[in-house]
Amino acid sequence: MNVLEALRQARRLLPQVSDEPELEAELLLRHCLGVDRASLYRLLTAELSEEEQQRFRDLVRRRLIHEPTAYIIGHKEFFGLDFEVTPVAIIPRPETEVLVELAIEAAHKKLLADALPIADVGTGSGAIAVALASALPEGKITATDTSPEALELAQRNAARHRVDKRIRFLQSDLLDTVPGRVDVLVANLPYVTTADWKALPPEIKDHEPREGLDGGPDGLRVIERLLEQAPARLSPSGVLLAEIGDMQGRAAKAAARAAFPEAAVKVMPDPSGRDRVLAVHT
């Protein structure tokens, strides 16, 4: 079997579990062979060894029982950066890039006399904190998570992108152990309702950590707790940005206005026009 035949075989099998069988077949084979995309397509007529064929079959088999490709190959691109991912944290998703873009925009609007304090609450793999540190050299970033395993993963990702000296990692329940005030507070907390979590595809429900997804009966349980803590921790003229579900805009705005009665509260859309980020400007 050569490389092209292996790709074709995987492309025939993967549609039963994937909406992008061609891409996932390519990612799995590249991981199997340890090559980049350009090299893979230069090798289309190259014969695979028996060991390589078996290794690729094993990878495809794992995908066919609904293990996410990102966990199988151990990494995922986010905001133009490559991140290590493991089942201790949810997989970074493209829609969260809107949150990062808004945080960068908010930071650029601040007049910087000193380092700009930023908090990434519920950092998981560290994707948001690392993306912000890469884009904002002036940022003084604190990243929190309740999971020590997730924090270890986030620290590895920070070191991978050489921003580990500019991010402080704290084990914390939301803002509990974060000292002082911050100018920009960013959070991608669990916001899926419990009923929706139970109906998620097995790639998500059976493999990604529930505590990173399930936000309770209305999906806002953890976000509302953050909103309760935030007024005492956000600087005057600060900004809070929290990712939300596309049906949660009205409820999230009501919760934010209760916590910040004098603030400007908006819901920002993602590129498809769906509610995506709760924005509070104090």
Image (cartoon, grey):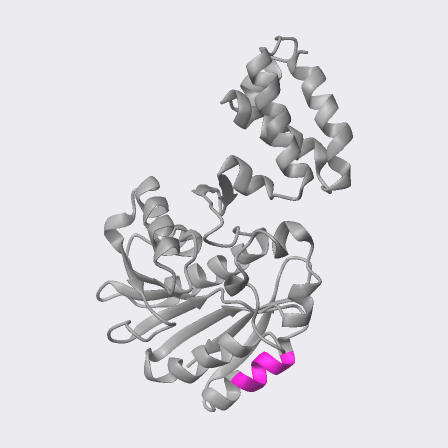
Image vertical order of residue 275 relative to residue 16, above or below: below
Image vertical order of residue 55 relative to residue 273, above or below: above
Does the rendering let one see residue 274? Answer: no
Q: Which one is in front, 19 or 117?
A: 19
Which residue occupies 60% across, 24% down? Answer: 56
Q: In the rendered view, does 194 fall on the left or right side of 261?
A: right
Q: In the rendered view, does 42 fall on the left or right side of 87?
A: right
On the image, the x and y values in percent for residue 64 come to: 69, 38
Q: Which one is in front, 212 or 279?
A: 212
Q: Which picture quadrant has residue 22?
A: top right
Q: Which picture quadrant has residue 248?
A: bottom right
Q: Label the magenta part by its dominant secondary structure.
A: helix
Which quadrant would the C terminus be assigned to in this image? bottom left
On the image, the x and y values in percent for residue 27 come to: 59, 31
On the image, the x and y values in percent for residue 31 come to: 53, 27
Q: Which residues are magenta?
A: 250-255
Which residue occupies 28% across, 64% down? Answer: 116
Which residue occupies 60% across, 31% down? Answer: 59
Q: In the rendered view, does 276 fall on the left or right side of 74?
A: right
